[in-house]
Structures are given as C-alpha cells and as structure tokens.
Image (spheres, rainbow, N blue to C red):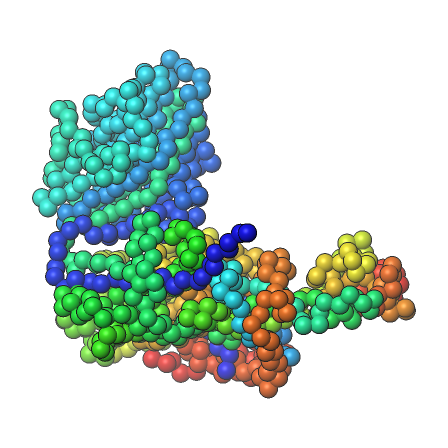
Amino acid sequence: MSVRTQRNSLPLLCLDFKKTLLVTDWYEYFRDDFDDGLLEPEWITHGLSADRTIVEASDVLTIASANNSDSRWWCATRNTAPKIYLPLGVIGPCRITTKLNSFDDDPGVLNASCNDDTMAGIFIGTDPEIASGVAGKAWMWQRIRVDMAGTDGIRLMSNCSIKDTILDCSSGCPLPYWFRINIDSDQVITFWYSTDGSAWTEYLHAAAPYPISGYDIENSYVGLVGNNRDGNEDFSAKFEYFLIEIYEAQHPIEVECLAPIDTRAPTTFYDGRIKQMSSLKRAIDDKTGLFQIADMSLTLANEDKHYSQLMASRFLKNQEATLYHAWTEEPDADKAEVIKLIVEDYSMKGPDFIIKFKDITQKYFTKKVPENICTIDDFPDIHPNDEGRCMPEILGNASLSNAYEHPGAVRAVYVDTWGPPYRCLASAGLITIPDDEVWVGDTQKSSPAHYSVVQAGGRTYIHFVALQDPGDESVTFNAHGYSVPAWDSVNDYVQNLSYIIQYFLRYIMGIPSSLINAPSFATLAGYYEDMGVEENGYLILQSRVDAMETLRQLLFTGGAKGFMAMNGKFQVQRKNICNWEIDSNEHHIFEQVELFGSPHRQWNLTSAVNTVTAQFGLIPWQNLFIGARKDFIPNDYESIMEDDIRTDPPLPPFY
Amino acid sequence: MWNLPWTDSEVLIADRITEELLKRGKGDLKVSFSLPMNWIEAFDILTNFRLQEPFGIDGSSNPPEERGEVGRYYYIESITYDFMNQKLNIVAVDLQFLLRQIMIVAPCGDVAETWATASETDKLYAYVGNCEADSFVSDGARLKRVAPCGVC
C-alpha cells in the first residue's frame, strides 16, 4: 500500500522592516546581475567590433575577443580592448566589486614573436576611451595569463608602461575570483581580491605608487574589460555581476518571512504568523492597456506581542514586501514570485497585526511629471511668467516647422533675464536643436547671430545674444530628444515608441531597472521596426500631467499593454498575429476536467463599436501634442487624415 | 474618445484604429472561470490559452465543424489569487479578433486541402474548399473559405 502526501498551496511573504536607528554600513548603489539578456542602458561600451564582443546571456556577461583581434587594454597609442563602463557617480567611500566566473584562452599556436597576454578584470579611469597611454589615468585590476611566458596570476596595471608584481598562480588561482576596488573617505584607492566572495585580501606590493591617492574620483568611470594581445588565441571572460556599494548612514532593512504555518526552508525560516489574507487581483484594462492591482490586506498573529515590540524601533510604511507562492512538498528554491507589494498602512487590534498593501508601482505612478520645476531659488532671475514652470522633457522628433513653418513644438523656460546672454532652459536633459529652429513669438531666429545652444550641468539652454532679449514673448523651438545609445534610432536619439515608454518609466518616472523587464521592450521595439514605424514615436512633457495617464496614452498609441508580471517586473506586450496559435496551444483547458464550476461567457454586445471618435497628433504641432484635436473617425478615417487635418489652421497654443 | 497622441505615423495610427475597430466590432467577448491553484505558475496576465466548450468533445460522425468548439482562444485579462481557498479566478478576453485582421493568400499547394491536415489558422480562416460543392475537395467537409486555384 502506498501513501500519497497531500500537496498544498502555500503563500509566502517576505516583508522589509526598516529600523528607525541610522546605521552606517555598506549599501547597494548600483547592481547589474547580467540576468536579463540585455545590457542596461547605463553602460557605455567601447572597443567593440565583429571579433571583439560583449554579450549578456545565460546570467553572465561575456567579454570575448578572437585571436589577432588586437584587443589591447590602453597601451601606447592603442585602447582597443572591449570594455563596458559607467560613471562612478559617487564621491564618498565606496567599493566596486565583480565576480569573474571564467577566464578562457585557447593556447593555440604559441609564437615567440607574439605577446599572448590575456587579461580580464575591473577598472577605474577618468578617461576610459583615451587612445594614448598616460600613466595613472586608468587602473585595471585583473586576472592575467601569458602562456608564452608561463605566467598566470592577478595583477594591477595602469597603462602598459606600469606593470606591477604578478601574484603567481602557477600553484593555482581557482576560479571564480572576486575583484574589488575600494575608495575610502580620503579618496584613496586600494585593490582587493577574494576566492570566496567573503574573505578579502589587499593586493599589497612594493612597486609603483600604491595605494593610489589624489585621483579625480568625482569624474571617474568604472567598468569591466577584457584584453587579448596579438597572440594567436581566442579569449573570453565571464562576469557574474557588477556592484557599486556606498558606505553611509541609512536605516537598515530587516527582512521577516511569513507563512500560514511554520515553514523551515533550507535558507529561510517562514514564521507561521499569517492568519488571514485577502485575495489578490492582478489585471490589465484590456481597453487602455494599463494594469490594475487591487489592494491586499494581511492579518498576522500578534498573540506573543512580537509586533508590539518590533514596531517600537521599526517602521513599515512604504516598505517593500514580496509575495511568493510555493508548494508544501517542494523545495524553497522552487517558489515563484507572485508580486511585489508596498505597505500602505498597518494597525494592531488585540492579537492581530493588520497590514494593508498596495502594488509597488503605486510608489512610482501616483505622481505627476515632470518633477523638475524651475523655481526662483534655482533661477533667481527667472521671468515672472515662467516661475514654477516645468523643465521640459523631450523624446523623439519634436518638430513642427518642416512642413508648416509654425513656431516650435516646445516652449522654453526663460530662466535668466539678467543678460546677455539671456538664458532660456530648453530641456531638463541633453537634446539637440536643429539650426535656426528657434522662435521668439512668431519670429524665427538664427544661430549664431541671435542665439546659441549650450549644454551645461546636464541641461540644455538657449542663450540669446545682446539685443535679443525675448522679453514677454514665448520662446519656442524644435528638438531631437534624449539619446540612450542602446535605444537610439539611426538618427542617434530615442524614437522607437517602445524605448520611449521604457525611458519614461525609468528616467522620468524613476522606476528602478530591477523592476523593468527590458527584453519585453526590445521585443516590442522589434515589432515597431517590422512595421516600419521605429522613428515615429515621440513624447513631450512640458506641463505637469498625471504619470499614469501619460503611460496610458503611450501604451494605447502603440497598441501595447503594460503590467507587472509574476516575476515582479514591468513588462510590455502586444498581441501578435504571428505567434498567437503557438502560444495558445501550450495551455488547453478542458472545462469538464479543470474548472471549478462552469465558465461564464459574456458577449458584451452593448460595447460593440463600428465607428470611433479619436484624437491624435498625426502631424505634430504645438496644439496637438496634448491631443487637443478632436476628430470624428468614421470608417474612411484615412480621408480625414489626408485632407482635413492638414488643411485646418492650428488651434491656439495650449500654453 | 480614443486618444493616440504620441506618434506622427499614419501607418501606426491606421493600424491601431483598425485593430480596435476589429476587436470591438462584434462585442467584447470575455469568459470568467475558476481554476485550482496548480495553474498558478502557468498563467500570468496576457497568457494565451484555449478553453474547451462543455460539449466540444464529440465522438460522433458529425462533420468536424459541427462537433463543437475544439478550444477557443483567449488571453488572460485578470487573475485573482485566492490563497485561502486555493484557487485562481480568471477573466479572459477573446483572442480570435486577431484573425479578423488577416487574409491568407498563398499558393494553392501551401493551403491544406483536408481538415485533418489543416492548421488551426487554416481551420478558422483559409483552408481550401470547393465552391460548387460547398465542401472540401478531398474529404467532403463543408467549405469555409478559400477555393482551390481555378475552381471559382
């Protein structure tokens, strides 16, 4: 006789409690686990070619170069090694860590006339792309192997003229290897290695200046690099993660994991305090493409006054919680994330501790954008009419004048009337303004006779010369919006509607990259490319609008739907005629077998439509950017698009 | 009011308005039902699936197209996780509006001539029939759509 165990569904919740006490410690500042198959847009790449590649796949970043590809780390007049890097962005104490999982070179055919140095590691530099080697401008902390010379170890090097003592690995330097660059409060740089990721050894040596001080930390970049000198070898190195941590005072997080019954998983103990939890609804609005997540409440056992004591020195408001689902008979590692939540409120009532959750994206979506406002504090000489106006955010081609000779698509903010130069803020970021596409009132201005475009402090300004004070007139201009190299169109700025949505989420809404499913945006971008509309998206934000409404407009314009998927990341998707059948056949549900009860089919015929009223900015000019145009679109809407809109005079400007 | 403000492409606007009109032209077909928790990892929002009608399984000798639905196509609009009762409540949207957007034009040899060899897309839209007999050329099942070359 066999005994069959019952497999039960088990909700698991991990909840962040934040301590009220400030504790100085190491806190994560930037992390890339190379696990989503796409390089994060923060990364800058250099030295890539057909035989020098950097690929993120299978949860690692692989830097590879073929034999004789001359992939040299910054030496003499060459700096061709494939590398990725980003601005350090920190001036205080910090440390940069990576894990090198593999370091493979094919010994190939050794040639006494060749130097077959292969290296991979982490670097810091003030000018990572400079062509000529200047000692001390950049430091590479590396694993090195030189088969020809029989050397194998780790070392620190600057340009090729400084090579410090090689730590001998002939008796073994087993991979993986961890490398760390440490910057202390005096901005002194030291280099550390580890073979287990926890015990660290400083790389001490006699030669060369060490530790390194007086370095321009504020303008430094950090990254990963692979070097393959001309030695008849194919080379590749795999990195598992890249991490920047800062040392500062923060409220530390303490995680408590909970379940309906005590659950001892190998690495986590789930305290069986969940008494009751409401159902959780995740949905999209099929008509608008926006997602909706209902609030959830949780009742925890507080008979032992655990939370009464805990909440005396901790708080939960706005803290994260992750809800998982697991099966009682399966390993902890097999649990699946259902959703990330954020604590909205909590209360205690007798033996119950009750927590109310909202979807975590509420933290980012329930706000108005743009968030940057031009104030008299920041701009003491701002024009009174412009005080409190938003700094414009511009993506895509904001251009009106090509066809219509109307004033510009965007209105600048007159932030400095104490000229010359008379400064107008064009954008909160870096944009380009086509020559002579600036207007004061209805008068077109030319560059450089009347104005110049200046980029400073990460913003873009229009500087009017003497005798060109705009006064009370509006300054408008056309522009090519922000650039993110990984997302740019052939015109070198972001135009694909999918990437405009991603930019909006990440850099205007401020949603962390860890909450965004980047590959889904790449897939959607490919869809628009296939349609031939990859250069036809744009977004202009110059007055405060509801972020959720803007997202709805973007999704609906592109026919996409956006939602927080079960992996806790925001994902976009568009139903595709090309794969619907294959996808559908994965799950075939038989009502008689699978369902509880009978399904309810609804035709909703009252919502059937054969004509629509639509508004759109087909040819963008200023009054259409906010969708001001109202058109009735019968079945022959094309005729309206062709004939009506183009001949109508523009509506009055909305600003 | 349908608002499509963030593109300057006539192609995309035309595509989007057409898509929405096709989708909603015949109602807003949805289905709601409850499933055991076992499906939790298989289903997420927008996951496609097929749902078999109660009388879809038919062992009779009726013509294939009269044997009931063999599994209509949907995608998930809403999932409600009821952990305490260990079940999922699903609301799903008819996916077959996509098929109203296409017409398959192919060489005769590329379109299935029998129900048995037709793909789901063919069955719904484009298998070869005989106009005069109102049936399949090979097995006599009733015609649905496209005639073989030179017949009509």
What residue is at 33 percent from the left and 74 percent from the top? A297
Query: Looking at this view, is A203 or A230 the one in front?
Result: A203
Q: Which quadrant of the view contains residue A487?
A: bottom left
**Residue A589 shows in this picture:** yes
Position of residue A211 relative to residue A41, above or below, is above
Among the 4 quarters of the image, the one containing residue B70 = bottom right
State the residue in front, A534 or A581.
A581
Q: Residue at x 71, y 69 (%)?
A: B56
Q: Residue at x 41, y 16 (%)?
A: A110
Q: Position of residue A512 (x, y in %)?
A: 32, 59
Q: Residue at x 35, y 39 (%)?
A: A239
Quarter holding residue A154: top left
The percent coordinates of residue A82 (x first, y second) are 37, 36
Report the residue that reaches farthest toward the bottom: A606
Q: Quadrant of the C terminus of chain A?
A: bottom left
Q: Does residue A536 appear to the left or right of A453 in the view shown?
A: right
Number of callouts: 0
Spot occupied by residue A511 in the image (x, y as percentages of width and height): 33, 62
Direction left: furthest residue? A186
